[in-house]
Image: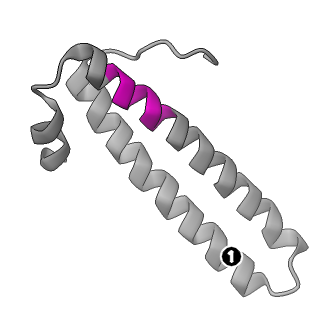
Amino acid sequence: MRPIVGLTESLPKDILEGLVVEAMYRHRYLRDVANLRHADISQAESNLQARSAYVRAMIDMHAQQTVLSTLLDVLGYIPKTPNG
């Protein structure tokens, strides 16, 4: 994703690392939301609504994964986070 590379490649490493860690936490959050939406599918009366919510959650998660992967490429390493 060239726009992200262009915006971040000249940032100081400590600032970029903070952005990466934030993106990691956001991805984890979106993964958890997608897992909850998946669990809702079997419990929902209207499977179509639950499936639609799951698909939206997965799209959000995968979009964030692309952002995270790009930021990790720019940074060049995986930073440590307090929760692993």
| Residue 58, x across and y down, in percent | 55, 60
| Residue 45, x across and y down, in percent | 88, 85
- Observer-nearest residue: 39 or 75? 75
Q: Is residue 62 left or right of residue 54?
A: left
What secondary structure prevails in the magenta region? helix
Query: Residue visible at 27% across and 24% down?
Result: 16
| Residue 40, x across and y down, in percent | 81, 67
Up the image or down, 55 lies above or below 36; here it is below
Asked if the stretch drawn in magenta spans residue 43, the answer is: no
Query: Residue visible at 48% across and 59% down?
Result: 60
Query: Residue visible at 73% across and 77% down?
Result: 50
Residue under circle 1? 51
Please report the bounds of the magenta region as a residue range: 17-24
Up the image or down, 56 lies above or below 6; here it is below
Q: Is residue 71 left or right of residue 79?
A: left
Query: What is the total number of numbered labels drawn onto the structure image?
Result: 1
Which amino acid type is marked by label 1?
A: Arg
- Observer-nearest residue: 75 or 12? 12
Query: Residue visible at 43% across and 37% down?
Result: 23
Residue 36 picture quarter: bottom right
**SS type, badge 1:** helix
Up the image or down, 40 lies above or below 5; here it is below
Which quarter of the rendered picture does the C terminus lie within?
top right
Q: For label 1, count other residues whose C-alpha is less than 10 Å away and answer few (under 14), some (14-19) or many (20+).
A: some
| Residue 42, x across and y down, in percent | 86, 70
